Structure formats: C-alpha cells, structure tokens
Amino acid sequence: MPKTLIEPFRIKSIEPIRVTTRADREQLLAAAHLNVFLLHAEDVLIDWLTDSGTGAMSSRQWGAIMEGDESYAGARSFYRLEKVIQDITGMPHFVPTHQGRAAEKVLFSAVCKAGDVVPNNCHFDTTRGNLESMGVQALDLVAAVGLQPATLHPFKGNIDLERLEAVLRQDGARIPFGMLTVTNNTGGGQPVSMANIRACAALLKKHGKPFIMDVCRFAENAMFIKMREPGYENTSVKAIAQEMFSYADGATMSAKKDGMVNIGGFIVLRSDEWLDAVRSGLIMMEGFPTYGGMAGRDLEALAVGLEEGLDEDYLRYRLRTAEYLGERLDAAGVGFVKPTGGHAVYIDARTVLPDMPVAHYPAWALCNALYLEGGIRGVEIGSVMFGKRGDDGVETYHSMELVRLAFPRRMYTQSHFDYAAEVIAEVKQKAAHIRGVKITKQPKFLRHFTAQFDWA
Ligand code: F0G
C-alpha cells in the first residue's frame, strides 16, 4: 500500500492566490498596524485564521444550492435538512439559526437566568460571552491533562467528572444544564471519548440536569473515537456520531465547521419542553422556524454537507493533515499542543522565542513573523487575546503563548502544508531576528481583533 494519504477529491473550481514578496508583506503588515486581523485577505497566501465557514463546498453542494426553496414558511429545503439532522442526531426538534453563536444565544435566552452556572469542558469564546452577558457563570472543567500542552493523551477534551460531580452537588440548584464541547476548540481541538460523554450524561441525569452538546466538530470527534477508543474500530463514524448524540438532550451547532458550509447553524432538542420558548426567541432574533437565519439554498448545502462531513476517507485525510504538519514541526524543533487536534495545530511560541519578554507578546510576534516570512496567517492565542490592561495601565498576561493555525476544509493541498512547514522552520532558524510588539491602541473588550501595534 502506498504510504501517501491523498486528498480524497479533485479540484473542479479554483481560486487564485496572489503571490506577494517579503517586501510587499512588510508594507502590508505595517499598514495593518502589525495586526494580521486588519490585513485584506487577498494579501494572504495561506489563510489559516480559522476553519469556520472558510472551506470549499463540493459540486454536489453547489448543485443542491440551485434546489433551494426560498419560501418564507414551510420550505421544502427545511424538511429535507430536518430529515438529515434527525437521522444523525436522533432528535426530533430542529431549529435553524444563521451560525453557532446565534444558536447559543437563542437557547440560552430561553433557559438561563442571571445567577445560573453552566459547566462545560471548555466554553468557546462566544458561548462564554453569551452566558456571561446574561449574568451566568461559564465554568470550565476540562480534565487536568487537557491543560498540559506537551502531554500525550488520546482524549484531552474530556471533562473532569469528579469536579463536575462536586459542582452538581454544591451548586445544583443554580445549574440549568451541563455542556460538553466536541471537539474542545479552546483546549486545542482535542476530542472527548465516548466513555466520557456517556459518564457525563449519566452524572447529569442522576442530578436531574439536561445535557447539551456544542457539536461544531462532532464528525472529527467521532473519527477520533473510531481511531483511538477501543471497541469502535469497526463502527462507522456515522454510527459513532449517532451514539454520541444519543446521550444528549440537545445540541447547538455551528454548521460552518463539520457542516461543510460557509454559513449556518442550528439547535436540536429531544424534548419539546423548551421548544416554545426557543421558537419565540428564534422568531425575534433570527427568523421564522422553518428558515431561522438561513436562506433555502443554505439549508440545501448543509443537508449535503452534513453527510459529506461524515465521510471516513475525508475525515482520515483531514485528521492526518494536522498530524502531518505536527510531524514536520517536531522535525524542526518547534513545539505545539500534542497530539494535534482535528481542525488546527497550536504552535507553542515559547519554543521559538524562549527569551522574548511576555510584555513583547511572543505569540503575536510569531504570528507576524509567519506572515512576513511566508504570507501565512494564523491567530494568536496568548496575552493579546487573553491579557488585559487595567485602568491603572497594569497588564495581566495569559499562561500560554500559542499561535493557532486552523485549516479550512478541503481547501489546501499537501504542497501548501509542505510550504508552511518550511516557512515555520525558517522562522525558527531566524528567531533571533524576530521583533516583539507593543500595543499603541486598544479597545476595552476583545482587543485582539482591532488593536494596533508598533515594534517593541
Ligand atoms: N462553539 C465552538 C466550539 C466554536 O469553535 C465556535 C466558533 C462557535 C461555537 C461559534 O460558532 O462562529 O458559527 O458563531 N469558532 C470559530 C473559530 C469562530 O475560529 O474557532 P459561530
């Protein structure tokens, strides 16, 4: 058997990438105030800012788009997608939204109130934001191993069941439901095992609490279970996904990930207890229940995308891509969160810039260096994103300095990954010349998106 795992698709439509020189990029980054979020995407060679909504759709999806029924109420496209979602999730109630954070907002507004506590392995930023803005505490209870970047473990997304039980005992009255995020994006795109999902569900049930999953990357999680959890080697990924959902009472999904579409999301619910409240909120915030925040054509593309996202050849190639880049980084002596997750590689900037003071934002500096050296755009997950400047001007820093390279689905080929590996190795070689940055202008919240910088 040949060793090379090929992209299990061929290219039918292409989008040219504009090649830039280092001199171009120096100018462009300066004009963007040394913040890659402020670059024009056209000036980026390899855009690994996010895997969300950035992937390539298949010819089947583009074909389905022409079938979109744009009726306001009762569109055919809604019923088609509903069938696909009911089949995968086993849940009767499907509520479409325009993306994941809208699903969160609609669900949380219907069932949470100020003073509540919602436990999760790790809340994604928008999940946390949606809860905290309602006065709800978003509690992260990922297992200790999930916080150790260099430690190998097959399921670093698992929730710490003992801590969950303690919280249920202590604060049960304030908990409207428990959550699990699969895969755990905040922790490195790490999967949750079926055993952990099952045990988490049982624990919540024992305490009379519903169990909601954040399932943006459920197909990648299911593939990890197939590859890593004894007993699932011969089970289809779809059957694994169905079993994952069988333990839950509901889910929120950003379809921009494993739904293989550029926009879309949904809520599913097993019981109709919350349905009226959810649908009332939906009508106010998103739209009529048979389209939510989506066009009929988007519903069609998602119906096809959900099935394609469960294709095992695709998933094997997908997970292998991240692992492959990890191997190349290992060879170059660049550290990263191990093992590689499903949708991204998280470089540990400290292994490239061990001596740079944290006040010069080493992960931000590395992010800029990747752009300057090779036109690659990643995202800093470090002290710019999670640090804060107090009113007294004193800065608090994050515990880790990471750069996330997140891979759009079915978009970049192996040569793009080889190129990126060479660029990263080159940056590591020249690390002594990488310059840190200082913030010259920043907003009070979510500063990484719009802050401006100068060289430190
Ligand atoms: N939950 C998780 C685990 C996510 O990763 C995201 C988005 C959302 C919810 C929100 O979904 O973007 O459709 O509103 N993650 C993207 C990222 C933005 O880059 O990781 P959305």
Image (cartoon, helix red, strand yellow):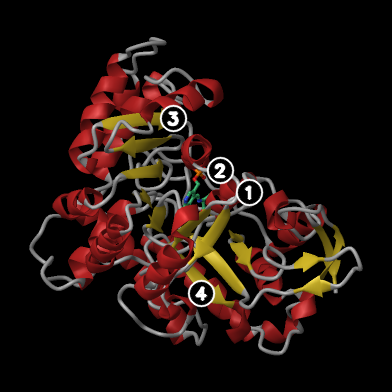
Image quarter (top left, top right, bottom left or bottom right) of the C terminus: bottom right
Question: How many angstroms separate mark 3 from mark 2 (CA)?
Answer: 14 Å
Give me the disc on residue 422.
Answer: 4
Return the residue at label 2: 113
Outermost residue, right side: 392
Are circles 2 and 4 on residues that touch, CB within 8 Å? no
Question: For the residue marked with disc 1, what is the amino acid?
Answer: Gly
The residue that disc 1 covers is 135
The residue shown at (42%, 71%) is 166
**Residue highlighted by disc 3:** 278
**N-term-proximal mark, 1 vs 2:** 2
Judge from the rendering whether residue 185 lies leftward or rightward of residue 314; answer left or right.
right
Give the answer, above or below, for where 13 lies relative to 39: above
- Quadrant containing the N terminus in the rendered view: bottom left
Asked if marks 1 and 2 touch (Cβ < 8 Å), the reply is yes
* Residue 106 seen in this snapshot: yes
Residue in view at x 41 percent, y 85 percent: 151
In this orientation, does residue 189 appear? no
Q: Is residue 384 left or right of residue 102?
A: right
Q: Secondary structure at mark 3?
A: helix
Other-residue count near label 3 (Cα within 10 Å), few / some / many at <14 / 14–19 / ≥20? many
Mark 2 Cα shell of 10 Å, populated few (<14), some (14-19), many (≥20)? some
Q: Earlier in the sequence, mark 3 or mark 2?
A: 2
Label 4 secondary element: helix
Q: Where is 284 relative to 390, above or below?
A: above
Secondary structure category for the residue under label 1: loop
Residue ID at (53%, 50%)? 127
Q: Nearer the viewer, mark 3 or mark 4?
A: 3
Q: Quadrant of residue 155?
A: bottom left
What percent of the width, then of the height, locates residue 347?
Answer: 53, 74
